[in-house]
Image (cartoon, rainbow, N blue to C red):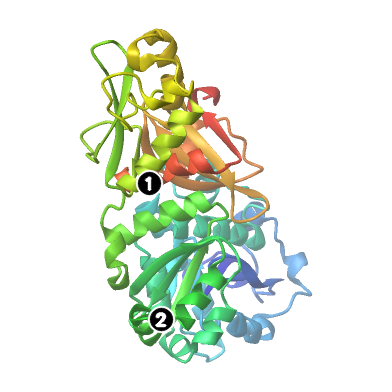
Amino acid sequence: MYAILDIETTGGKYNEEGITEIAIYRFDGHQVVDQFISLVNPERPIQAFVVGLTGINNDMLRNAPKFYEVAKRIIEITQDCVIVAHNAQFDYRILSLEFDRLGYDFDRKSLCTVALSQELLPGHASYSLGKLVKALGIPMTDRHRASGDALATVKLFKMLLAKDTEKTIVQASVRANPKRVIDTKLKNIIKEMPSECGVYYMHNVNGSIIYIGKSKNIKKRITQHFTGDNRKSKKIQNDVVAVTFEKTGSELVALLKENEEIKRNKPIYNRALRRTKYKIQLGHFLDDDGYINFKLDKADGRKKGITTYSSIASAKSHLEKITETYTLCSNKTGLTSSKGNCFAYTIKKCEGACIQIEAPEAYNKRANNFIKRYSYENKSMFIIDRGREVDERSVVLIEDGIFRGIGFYNLNFQLNNIEILKSIITQMDNNRDAQHIIQSYLRTKKVKKVIPIEEIAT
């Protein structure tokens, strides 16, 4: 749990400032579950430059509550939370200073979104809150007021959590609250899970990730883990003390995140999935007569392929569908190898490429239609799908046939700047599994839309 906050102050000498406004959003990693926003009477004058910056003046604060009147609420809303702020050192110091004046020892762990942004979002010209969120396409209102700045920090932190593929932020949070998670029984963990699409992470007492999975219904899948009686399920039930999750909205994004993060984090109970799963590759070549032929080989990242499969059986099953759908020749798709005409020609389901009755140009046109549809070789595009919330969309970036990563953007953001779109992308590895996931998903399921990069104005 996180308490994302912003504080406005009077300005003045170091450690003599007073709070004029405070906004705190209690954030569970997915949504705001509680909030506190209030002006505060600092019992001291506000510096003129601060009035010009924030618009908060002495008259506005005359009838506002004094800090001791809101202190209890601040303690309650930040209980069992990690304090998160943009330039957290400043906000945490000011908050601790006010509590010191009351004789109360305010002790919380803290995270700074400036430092996290510099690590997870490198390359920006400025890391000031206003300039950074603008560069990332994050909507912002009431700049230099506590509520506006804190809410923008919530949205920034949500993006940083998605960028943190090694889950160091979440693991630190789990370690920070060991008593709470150890006392949580399996049935109570299930109650906290959403019935939505996403990726889930099982943690042990040290906060380390021991298992990563994805599901269209996280609650249902976690229930299956915790009610299973096989050896692996029982080990997980014994070791798990907390489950965190990330909603993705899009099943495609969930599949890509699961694939990436299992390989990156190597959880002990995901051993079978650390390795590449898709071992068979479909390629194509021109034969001596000028016809496009298809061939199944062992997957090899050095060779360009149309798509990959987990087994020979699934590959041949798909080839049969391809052959029928595009009226191709089974001799040319590798399903048969007869010297004369193929069987499909006998029953008039092949146009005769096998015995050179059909011209290569006509046959290759249909074969290329298949290749063009199911291969993204040399293509550059954004795959747009459902987001985590109704006002959000997910995006998968393919650039020159290479999978670059995933991201999320608000519907208020206009898709007209490639560089801003690229800046919200969490970089991921372009491995064979990721390529297969994208190709297979586009082949069998619907997404919101696919936008070629050249259609987006710069």
Q: Secondary structure at mark 2?
A: helix
**In the image, is 273 to the left or to the right of 117?**
left
Q: Which residue is mark 1?
A: 314
Q: Nearer the viewer, residue 448 or 292?
A: 292
Q: Are marks 1 and 2 in contact (CB under 8 Å)?
A: no
Please name the amino acid that badge 2 sits on: Ala
Measured from the top left, where is residue 384 in percent x and y?
A: 56, 40
Label 1 crowding class (10 Å Cα cut-off): few <14, some 14-19, many 20+? few
Residue 13 appearing in the image:
no
Q: Nearer the viewer, residue 202 or 124?
A: 202
Q: Identify the disc placed on residue 98.
A: none
Q: Measured along the vertical axis of the image, is residue 329 above or below residue 262? A: above
Q: Residue at x 44, y 84 (%)?
A: 177
**In the image, is 322 to the left or to the right of 455?**
left
Instruction: Quote the CA–CA distance across marks 1 and 2.
Output: 46 Å
Please name the amino acid that badge 1 sits on: Ser
Q: Measured along the vertical axis of the image, is residue 262 above or below residue 299? A: below
**In the image, is 256 to the left or to the right of 263?**
right
Measured from the top left, where is residue 14 in percent x and y?
A: 46, 69
Measured from the top left, where is residue 203 in percent x and y?
A: 38, 77
Q: Nearer the viewer, residue 148 or 385?
A: 385
> Closer to us: mark 1 or mark 2?
1
Q: Residue at x 39, y 67 (%)?
A: 212
Q: Measured along the vertical axis of the image, is residue 369 above or below residue 128? A: above
Whichever of labels 1 and 2 marks the residue nearer the N terminus, that label is 2
Q: Which residue is mark 2?
A: 176
Q: Nearer the viewer, residue 347 or 202?
A: 347
Label 2 crowding class (10 Å Cα cut-off): few <14, some 14-19, many 20+? some
Q: Residue at x 62, y 35 (%)?
A: 414
Q: Residue at x 44, y 42 (%)?
A: 440
Residue 210 appearing in the image:
yes
Q: Secondary structure at mark 1?
A: helix
